[in-house]
Image (tube, rainbow, N blue to C red):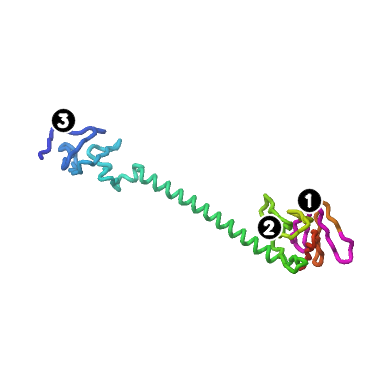
Amino acid sequence: MNADTSNDNIPEDQTALTVNDDTVIGADSAEDDTIITVPSDATIVQAPGVEEHTVVGAVVSEETVIPSSTTDEYPTLIGSLMDTSLGLAEILADVEEAHEAEAAERILRTEELAQQSRFFLRHINGTRTSLTQPVIAGRLPAAPRRGDVAVQLLVLDSPDGIVSGTHARIEAQGDVVVVTDLNSTNGTRVIIPGKPTVLLAPGESMALASGAMIDLGDSNRLEVLG
């Protein structure tokens, strides 16, 4: 094919070009003419402010060609997607790190409680319950709806229904064990050797030392040991 050198065939800025196979794009009057051969489904993109006959990019067979000489000057969709992906990855990494730190802190707190608490409860039937975590005792005990400390549920047999569903809370606090009546129906009694039995009022708490006995009714007595 012979190139037409007349000025009428020189494309102006922003001219839309429709090309066929082996179409030659160029102009004899331009300096450093470039002959470009593109497939018939290619698209030549003319960017604003770029000299005539400069190819900024072409879409060929669903692949985007981005010349290295233009990537620093013109933002690209691929670059934007890469930036977005990197930002999302950093956010996900931060969230995962926070979850791992929270889990590690929870494990450490549990281990510290286990090390700090030397107390345990011994039921009159011989079973033992460690006080590494607060104990909620009752016929059908339920954990509190709110609270950042895990609890143990101690189910007590009460054929006569004297023990309330959620009867009392027992937990180690430093050098003592604190028992709290949880508004039980028949009350919580504390037996300390050599002293009168104490009946706790609904919601009342009492600090106990090793050797004290907590009586919840129906032969459910818990001795504090440590």
| Amino acid at pointer 2 | Val
Secondary structure under badge 3?
Answer: helix
What segment carries the magenta color?
168-197
Query: Which residue is at 15% across, 38% downward?
Result: 28
Q: Is residue 83 left or right of residue 61?
A: right
Residue 24 vs 224, above or below: the answer is above
Distance of label 1 from label 3 (alpha carbons): 99 Å
Does the residue at mark 2 contact the one at mark 1 (Cβ under 8 Å)? Answer: no
Res 13 quadrant in image: top left
Q: Is residue 127 left or right of residue 103?
A: right
80 and 178: which is toward the camera: 178
x and y percent of residue 99 in the render? 55, 55
Secondary structure under badge 1?
Answer: loop
| Amino acid at pointer 3 | Asp
> Which label was assigned to residue 183?
1
Neighbour tally class for label 3: few under 14, some 14-19, many 20 plus, Cα within 10 Å: few
| Amino acid at pointer 1 | Asn
Q: Which residue is mark 2?
A: 151
x and y percent of residue 180 in the render? 78, 55
x and y percent of residue 203 in the render? 79, 51
Q: Earlier in the sequence, mark 1 or mark 3?
A: 3
Q: Earlier in the sequence, mark 3 or mark 2?
A: 3
Secondary structure under badge 2?
Answer: loop
Res 80 quadrant in image: top left
177 inside magenta stretch: yes
Q: Which residue is mark 3?
A: 8
Neighbour tally class for label 2: few under 14, some 14-19, many 20 plus, Cα within 10 Å: some
